[in-house]
Structures are given as C-alpha cells and as structure tokens.
Image (cartoon, coloured by chain):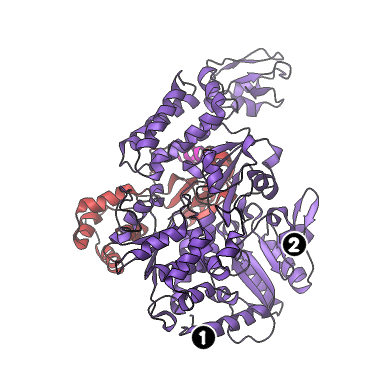
Chain colours: A red, B purple
C-alpha cells in the first residue's frame, strides 16, 4: 500500500451517506478497494465525529468486511444446508487444493483468487452453488470447479 | 420515467390505461428472472427473444404504455416461477405453456413455432413418468399449490410498476388511504389473524396496534429481509419477483400506525433483490406513490434500503435495528420492545417480507376471506423453500396446515433418485428435524412447535438415508457457533463446547457421556441466552438426539456411521469374491495400506488406511466398498 493514501475517494463516499450509515459507508469503501484499508478508519471516525473504536468494531463484526486485501476473483462456496447435503465440501476442498489455499489462507499470493464459504446464497434450487464476484454458478462438481478456475485464469491472462 | 400521479382519479385512469395495454399483449413470453434462472442464462434468453420477435416483424412490447396501438407480443422478465430445478423457465401466454431448461439455441424455435405458429414444442415441456405436461398448471409441482403471495411471480414483469398497476396493484393501498381509518386497517389485520411469517408467528395486527398507540411523532416501518437461514429463499423470491407488493404492504402499515418512513434490511448475499427493490422504490417515487403528500392526501412516506453485511444474528429484531443505525448487530435486553423503542429509539413495526406481502391481499379481500384459507389458528398460506435430496427443488406456496407428506411427495415429487426418506429439517438453525413418523403432521405454527420444531422462515431441507444426522447437527452447530455475536457467555462459549463434542463424535473420538453432556449444555444455553438465536441454538442437536439417538450411539460406542456419511468412520474393505488381484488399488493407495499377491484377493490394512477412497474409485471391479 502506498504511503500517500488518497482520501478523496473516502470524502466522496462520506458525502453520499448520512452519518448514521456507517455500514453503508464501509461497504462503499470496500467496494472501491475490495477490502477495508486501515488508513481509512481514523479518517472516517474523525469525519463522522465518532471514536475510531466504533468504526473498527463495526468493521470487525460483520462477515462481509475484510481488513485484508482480497483477490481479483472472489469465489464464494455456498455451504448452506441444501448445498451441504448435495456435496458442497468436496467442491470447496478441490478449489482450495487447486489454489493452495486453506481455511486460514483465503487469498492466493498473486491476489488473483480468494476462496471463502458463505452460509447460504439462497440459490438452493441450484445446489451446490458457488459465486464468482456475485455471479452464480449452479449444480457444481469438483471437476466443473476446476474447469471454471482454468477459464478465469485464462481470462485474467488475456486482460 | 413514470408520470407523477396526483390524485385518486388519475390513479384509476392510469391503471385502466395500462390494463388495456396489458390486454392487447395477446401473446406474452415470461422469462424467469429469478436468481436461479439468471444463473442459468435467462437474461440472455430474454434479450434473444426480444430480438427474434422483432426480427419476425411482430410488435414487441417490453413496457406498457398509456396509448397502445393494436396487438403486440409482450416479452417480460418475471419473478421466480419457483421450479428452479428445471430452469431456465419460459412461460408462454395465453397458452399457459411452460418450457423448461431453455437454452439460447432454443429461442429461435420458440419464437418461430410457438409465438408465430402457436404450436407447442414437446421437446421443451416438463416430463415426468412418461407424461408430457403442456401447461404449467397441470404439472403436479404447481397443481397442489395455492399461490397467493407468489401469485404474480412468473406472471408479470418484476421490474415494472406499470404491470403491477395493470393487474390492480396499489389498489389495497388506495383503499387504505382513502376509504379506511387507521383503526379499520388494524382491525382488519387483527381480525384476519395474520401471524408473522418470519418464524415467531406473532399476530401482526396486535403488533401494529401497539405501535399505533404510541404517542411519539416519529415512527418507523421496518421490513426484515435478512433471510439468513441456510436453505431458505422465499423472501428473496418475493423481493425479486414482486417488490411492489411488499412495498404496498409496508405503506399500508405506515398509514395504519402513523409512520412516514420505511426501512428495508436486505441480506448482502441478495444483490438482485437489492437491485429490484431500488428500481421499485424509484418507480413508486416517480409515480407519486411514495414521497410527500401522496395522491393529495397529505400522507407522506419514504423508503430506504439497507444492505446487510453478513451477520445472521441481524435477523433478530433489536440486532437488525442496531445494524440499520450503523452499529454492531447485537441483540439487547427486552423490554423495552421494538414496538416502543425500536429503530432510532422510536416505536417501530418490524415484520418480515412475506408478512408485508400478505397485507395487500387481506385489505383488498377482507379478513373473512383470508380466514377461509388454512386452519383457524394460523390462517393463510406459507411459502416454503423445498431443497435437499428431493426431486423438485424450488419455491412453493401451500395453505397452512398442509401435511409434510403432501409437500414432499406430491408437490416435491418425492425423493431424488428414489432414495429413502429419512428426515426433513425445518426452520433452519433454530428448527429441528422431523422423521418419517411425522409426515402427516400439518404444517402450521402450533403443530410444529409441539413436535419440537418450528416453521421458522420456511426452509425445508429433505434428507435421505445417506445423510448422517450427527453430521447435520454438527453442521448447524458450526453455523450457529460462527454466527453467535459473542454477547452472552452461554451462547458464545456453550456453542463452542457443543461443536467440539460433535466434532469429536463424527471423527470417531466420541466418549461415553457425550450425549448427556450435549443435552445438559443445550438446556443451559436455551435457558440463559438472551436472544432467539441463542435460545434455539441447540435445537438441531436436541431434535436429532431425540429422534436419532441410535445414530449418536453408533458413532460413540461402535465407531460406526450408519449412514456412511462420516469419512473418518468409514472402513474400506475388499470383497475377496470380487477382487481379481490386479493390484490397481495398491498402486493407487497414497499410504501403501494395501497389499497382496497378483491374481489373489488383496487386503487393506485398516491401521494404515487414511480413508481417502482412492482405491474404491480406482477399482474396475467394484470390489471395494465402505462399511
């Protein structure tokens, strides 16, 4: 991360929301950076006239917020009940195996992929399902997941 | 851009004009635009059909207008048809044909044969047991349902306020605004005995009356769209498929209780629902149905959307309002209750999506009509998400009081691949498992409560004989433990300990006394936790111990998983009668646990075996099985 943090992005976001909307503000920050840079916390706290702890407490409470940079492709493997009984775990294991990730290491070193679980995508009719940057892929199998990874790798290499 | 409607007369006129235009769409193509079908590529199909209809020289109508000229073909992206298993779905009116698993390459034929030629394409129809079902309503999955809350899903465009108006939308709001007093509305809802669809089953009318009684000038209407139960997607489908119906319900609650601001809290995992709701709010605001001085009556109502950030506990009332206020979503001690001190400490009506979606129906048709559906103590219908090892997964709606057997074997088409029914998990992490003996139990709030389960928000996950119930309990405990907000010690620590015990049981390290310890912890957590999540955290464990105690015992004492689902407890054996002695298994074994002489049966050393299953998948003679 560069030393000169660009606060104008944060300013623009703060101008858009009422001061109570801490969650919406953090969501917008995360959408921009793909994670929550710590540099932003003291600045947001000062602007909203609340303690830094308040911002930090919200940022660490909710599952969706990440203080670590995430990959270009965020893969969410659904492990809701419906996906679970139709075999979501072998898919998750295959994805982690292919990318050298684990439960603790969620993002690849080249910042290309992040693999995480989600408790339910509500796409139970397509179980087991995964999403890549919010696009839903249904009726997955470990093999299809590998195929998808290869497609994404190729797509990224081209871009 | 919608034209601003200034008064009641103009609202009627607009509605009539759009209805006329809707009528002139002699043929309508309804492409399912729910999350499931969108994932299958339905939006591309929608665009392709529009292109092809135009190419054929037909007048293609994607949006209703006030001054239609002649007959058209309407192409729409509708809400979820419910039959997600068979998606992407395309329905063609006036014939009522339902085409399943439609691909982009099928569009040409659909337009050519069905739109132009008015012919049915058998290839795309739903088939079961050799019967071809031409029309949607004939399909057993639909035939047994009563779709009231979901009536528009699959029949109108989910992104158009004009279509909603054309079929009589906002009529209930109009009636409440002009013809009813606040008490009349509350009386009607109370009289209907509508009970909260979010799980608790609290009478909605009573809640509204309590808020209406508060003297504070500021009150809020909050819609709980934080459908966090794994295996449930009813609310998602309503928000995506008929957003105006839900807004209408919230606005009526506003008139009834004197609130002028509404908040909708939607899960972050539902991006499409957020988008559809935003569109709906923008349209209603442009049309003057939301905003200041609505239809010249002096009534004002504005609507906000809040996206959740991934915390299951935010489905609990006080946690949800805290989250809207921009705080950590942690439940607080009650009383004071939300109806007195809710959002921003003001009196608040908090209902879930499906509850609000029921309101316009009751206001329009009356409480007597509503009470005629389902049993007296829990009238109306209920939407369920039917998932798991069942033939027809999807979104269904049946009258309350329908039995589980009817839902699973008639609507759901029975077990997937003809497997044996073992249990159905109902009510998500707060609910319980019901067994084959309970298939004739009517689905309503009170009957399920008596059986130790709950309707919850309405997720039904069907499990077959290959599902290990101890593993299911572990799965839910893992979920609850993750989602515990950490405020109360019994829930924070207790769920952790319960999870540890369950983990050791499924890993083959269960100890004598574990079942009793689990039960004791469950009692303590239920008795001492503050919020609903904590109080019910142990329910899946309690209900599986109650009905499947033998499975727990088999894991603990015999180190066996009867369902064969627990990897660590599986023993791989080579059947000497089937083994040809080819040594392929031994060559595939990563730990060298298999040995033998060529052309003689091989054996597995169970001490060395890591149970990876590589041998079983390598064997060409199906000689290796799990025991």
Contact? badges 1 and 2 (CB < 8 Å):
no
Q: State the image coordinates of residue B396 (x, y, percent, origin top left).
A: 61, 54
Is residue B57 shown above or below B322?
Answer: below
Q: Measuring 46% from the left and 61% from the top, which residue is drawn there?
A: B205
Is residue B423 shown above or below B266?
Answer: above
Label 1: chain letter = B
Side of B139 relative to B367 (left or right): right
Q: Measuring 55% from the left and 83% from the top, which residue is drawn there?
A: B12
Label for residue B290?
A: none
Q: Nearer the viewer, residue B70 or B315?
A: B315
Determine the secondary structure under disc 2.
Answer: loop
Is residue B533 shown above or below B558?
Answer: below
Is residue B620 shown above or below B318?
Answer: above
Q: State the image coordinates of residue A9 (x, y, percent, origin top left).
A: 29, 64
Side of B318 relative to B29 (left or right): left
Label 2: chain letter = B
| Label 1 to label 2: alpha-carbon separation | 37 Å
Residue B222 visible (yes or no): no
Residue that mark 2 sits on:
B135
Q: Measuring 37% from the left and 48% from the top, which residue is drawn there?
A: A63
Q: Pointer 2: residues within 10 angstroms few (<14), some, or many (20+)?
A: some
Q: Nearer the viewer, residue B614 or B449?
A: B449
Q: Nearer the viewer, residue B303 or B364?
A: B364
> First in sequence: mark 1 or mark 2?
1
In the rendered image, which quarter is residue B266 located in?
Answer: bottom left
Is residue B44 part of the magenta span, yes or no?
Answer: no
Instruction: Count up the numbered dots.
Output: 2
Determine the secondary structure under disc 1.
Answer: helix
Residue that mark 1 sits on:
B10
Find the magenta span and give its range: A91-102
In the rendered image, which quarter is residue B388 located in?
Answer: top right
Residue B341 visible (yes or no): yes
């Amino acid at each position: 991360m560069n030393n000169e943090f660009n606060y104008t992005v944060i300013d623009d976001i703060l101008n858009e929301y009422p001061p109570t909307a801490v969650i919406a503000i953090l969501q917008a920050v995360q959408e921009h950076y793909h994670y929550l840079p710590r540099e932003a916390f003291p600045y947001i706290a000062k602007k909203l006239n609340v303690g830094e702890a308040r911002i930090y407490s919200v940022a660490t409470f909710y599952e969706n917020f990440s203080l670590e940079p995430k990959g270009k492709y965020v893969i969410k493997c659904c492990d809701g009940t419906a996906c679970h009984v139709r075999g979501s775990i072998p898919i998750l294991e295959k994805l982690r195996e292919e990318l050298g990730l684990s439960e603790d290491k969620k993002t690849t070193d080249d910042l290309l992929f992040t693999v995480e679980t989600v408790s339910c995508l509500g796409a139970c009719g397509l179980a087991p399902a995964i999403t890549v940057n919010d696009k839903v892929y249904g009726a997955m199998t470990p093999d299809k997941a590998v195929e998808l990874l290869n497609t994404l790798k190729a797509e990224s290499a081209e871009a | 851009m919608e034209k601003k409607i200034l008064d009641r007369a103009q609202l009627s006129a607009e509605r009539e004009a759009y209805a006329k235009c809707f009528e002139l769409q002699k043929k309508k193509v309804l492409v399912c635009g729910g999350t499931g079908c969108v994932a299958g590529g339905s939006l591309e199909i929608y665009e392709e059909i529009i292109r092809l209809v135009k190419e054929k020289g037909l007048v293609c109508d994607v949006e209703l207008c006030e001054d239609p000229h002649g007959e058209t073909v309407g192409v729409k992206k509708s809400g979820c048809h419910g039959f997600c298993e068979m998606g992407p779905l395309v329905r063609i009116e006036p014939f009522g044909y339902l085409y399943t698993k439609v691909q982009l390459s099928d569009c040409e034929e659909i337009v050519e044969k069905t739109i132009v030629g008015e012919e049915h394409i058998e290839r795309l129809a739903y088939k079961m047991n050799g019967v071809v079902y031409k029309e949607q309503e004939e399909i057993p999955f639909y035939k047994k349902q009563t779709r009231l809350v979901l009536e528009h899903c699959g029949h109108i465009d989910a992104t158009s306020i004009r279509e909603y108006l054309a079929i009589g939308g906002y009529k209930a709001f109009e009636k409440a605004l002009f013809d009813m007093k606040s008490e009349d509305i509350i009386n009607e809802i109370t009289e209907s005995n509508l009970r909260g669809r979010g799980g608790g089953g609290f009478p909605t009318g009573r809640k509204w009356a309590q808020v209406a009684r508060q003297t504070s000038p500021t009150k809020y209407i909050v819609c709980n769209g934080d459908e966090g139960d794994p295996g449930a997607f009813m609310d998602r489908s309503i928000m995506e498929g008929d957003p105006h119906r839900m807004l209408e319900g919230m606005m009526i609650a506003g008139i009834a209780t004197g609130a002028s601001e509404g908040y909708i809290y939607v899960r972050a995992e539902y991006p499409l629902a957020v988008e559809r709701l935003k569109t709906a709010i923008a349209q209603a605001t442009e049309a003057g149905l939301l905003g200041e001085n609505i239809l010249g009556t002096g009534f004002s109502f504005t609507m906000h959307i809040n996206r959740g950030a991934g915390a299951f506990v935010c489905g609990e009332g006080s946690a949800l309002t805290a989250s809207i206020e921009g705080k950590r979503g942690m439940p607080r001690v009650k009383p004071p209750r939300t109806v007195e001190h809710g959002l921003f400490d003001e009196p608040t009506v908090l209902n879930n999506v499906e509850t609000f979606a029921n309101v316009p129906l009751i206001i329009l048709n009356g409480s007597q009509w509503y009470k005629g559906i389902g049993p007296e103590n829990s009238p109306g219908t209920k939407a369920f998400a039917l998932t798991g090892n069942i033939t027809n997964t999807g979104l269904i709606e049946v009258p309350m009081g329908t039995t589980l057997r009817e839902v699973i074997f008639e609507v759901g088409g029975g077990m997937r691949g003809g497997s044996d029914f073992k249990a159905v998990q109902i009510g998500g992490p707060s609910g319980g498992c019901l067994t084959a003996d309970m298939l004739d139990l009517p689905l309503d709030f009170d009957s399920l409560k008596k059986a130790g389960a709950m309707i919850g928000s309405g997720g039904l996950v069907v499990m077959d004989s290959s599902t290990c119930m101890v593993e299911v309990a572990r799965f839910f405990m893992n979920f609850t433990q993750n989602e515990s907000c950490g405020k109360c010690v019994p829930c924070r620590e207790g769920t952790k300990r319960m999870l540890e015990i369950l983990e050791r049981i499924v890993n083959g390290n269960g100890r004598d006394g574990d079942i009793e310890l689990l039960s004791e912890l469950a009692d303590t957590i239920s008795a001492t936790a503050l919020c609903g999540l904590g109080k019910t955290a142990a329910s899946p464990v309690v209900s599986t111990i109650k009905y499947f105690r033998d499975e727990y015992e088999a894991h603990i004492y015999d180190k066996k998983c009867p369902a064969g689902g627990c990897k660590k407890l599986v023993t791989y054996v080579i059947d000497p009668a089937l083994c040809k002695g080819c040594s392929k298994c031994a060559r595939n074994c990563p730990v060298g646990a298999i040995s033998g002489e060529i052309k003689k049966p091989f054996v597995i050393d169970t001490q060395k075996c890591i149970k990876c299953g590589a041998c079983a998948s390598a064997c060409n003679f199906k000689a290796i099985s799990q025991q």
